[in-house]
Amino acid sequence: MVTDWRHHWDDLPKGMASFTTNMLVPPMTPGRLQDNTRATLLLFSREPRAPARAWSGTVSDIVFTRELSKIGFRVKLTRQIRFPAKYANLEDGWYVEIADPTRATHGLW
């Protein structure tokens, strides 16, 4: 999950956040959303846009409201991590990394 929004990811009120469905970056879809999924949460600075901080954590209590095209969710940070260089050029959005079946990975959410 990638954003340059203020109050993310370590400053969310009660750990709650929301994205609109236009933040889902294909192949991510509402059908792929699963509670208690491990996630990599990335924060970028705005001006100039640059990697700022990163955390591993979980995403839970996901509520998809189709009428509003909105997804509410709770974020629980496990620990701050080094910003993964391979994600340094991502735009804001909710990504899924399809796991390579030949190796274990938790992917990027």
Image (spheres, helix red, strand yellow):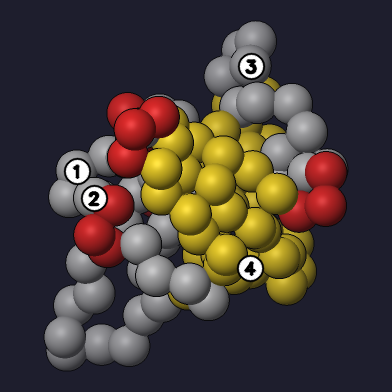
Q: Are marks 4 and 3 in contact (CB under 8 Å)?
A: no
Identify the residue under disc 2.
29
Per the model, the C-alpha gap separating discs 1 and 2 is 7 Å
Q: Nearer the viewer, residue 55 or 63?
A: 63
Closest to the camera, between mark 3 and mark 1, is 1
Report the quarter where the C terminus lies: bottom left
Q: Are marks 1 and 2 in contact (CB under 8 Å)?
A: yes
Identify the residue under disc 4.
57
Q: Earlier in the sequence, mark 2 or mark 4?
A: 2
Q: Residue at x 24, y 59 (%)?
A: 31
Q: How many marks?
A: 4
x and y percentages locating residue 106 in the rendered image: 41, 76
Identify the residue under disc 3.
46
Q: Quadrant of residue 17?
A: top right
Residue 2 falls left or right of residue 105: right
**Mark 3 burial class by Cα count in 10 Å: few <14, some 14-19, many 20+:** few
Is label 2 in a helix, a strand or a loop? loop
Q: Earlier in the sequence, mark 3 or mark 1?
A: 1
Per the model, the C-alpha gap separating discs 3 and 1 is 23 Å
Identify the residue under disc 1.
26
Q: Are marks 2 and 4 in contact (CB under 8 Å)?
A: no
Per the model, the C-alpha gap separating discs 2 and 4 is 20 Å
Q: Residue at x 65, y 10 (%)?
A: 47
Three-letter residue code for mark 4 = Gly
Per the model, the C-alpha gap separating discs 4 and 3 is 23 Å
Three-letter residue code for mark 2 = Thr
